[in-house]
Image (tube, grey):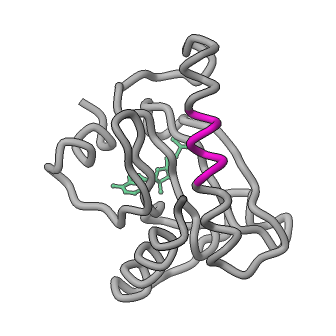
Amino acid sequence: MSVFTKIIEGEISCYKVAEDENFIAFLDINPNAPGHTLVVPKKEENKLFDLSQDAYTNLMNFSYRVAKALERTVPCNRVGMSVIGLEVPHIHVHLIPLNAMADIQFKQKVKLSKDAFVTLAESIAVNFE
Ligand code: AMP
């Protein structure tokens, strides 16, 4: 069972941003930038392009709504998107508020307090439509 399935099943906590029947979005615990969010299908699968085209489109549509909430909440030049999955083999879309190329390179990380994570997640959640 992946660490994200444990989050989905409530065994591990997360800073939740959005959820529906099929997807959950929560803050990345080791963010590239404040507001770095992961969008995860609840059905555990490993690779993005093993999804059916419908499942892929649904994931992108949910990610679009989360990206819009990020744009409304976190000041940035734009929201970037990346799918990697080399660390956690459960499909997830990284949505990252970008100001510089370094923000999408997964080398430079920011440290946030628990309070900062909570406040960020709550303010993004309010702007999720
Ligand atoms: P990758 O599989 O390479 O796309 O990276 C996995 C991402 O998941 C990394 O950015 C981690 O910081 C993030 N991550 C791992 N465990 C957790 C967790 N429990 N809560 C939030 N994010 C996590």
Residue furthest to the front in view is 129
Question: What residue range appears in magenta?
Answer: 59-65
Task: Name which quarter of the figure residue 13 lies in.
Answer: bottom left
x and y percent of residue 115 in the render? 35, 88
Using the image, determine if residue 113 lies above or below residue 33. below
x and y percent of residue 117 in the render? 41, 78
- Residue at 57%, 71% in the rendered image: 35
> The C terminus is located in which quarter?
bottom right
Using the image, determine if residue 119 lies above or below residue 33. below
Task: Name which quarter of the figure residue 3 lies in.
Answer: top left
Task: Name which quarter of the figure residue 2 lies in.
Answer: top left
x and y percent of residue 114 in the render? 34, 83
> The N terminus is located in which quarter?
top left
Q: How many badges with numbers are in the image?
A: 0
Using the image, determine if residue 89 lies above or below residue 62. above
Instruction: Decide whether the magenta segment is chiefly helix, strand or loop.
Output: helix
Pick the front one: 47 or 57: 57
> Does residue 69 show up magenta in the picture?
no
- Residue at 42%, 64% in the rendered image: 29
The answer to whether residue 12 is left or right of residue 40 is left
> Does residue 61 show up magenta in the picture?
yes
The answer to whether residue 78 is left or right of residue 70 is right
- Residue at 50%, 81% in the rendered image: 111
- Residue at 52%, 62% in the rendered image: 128
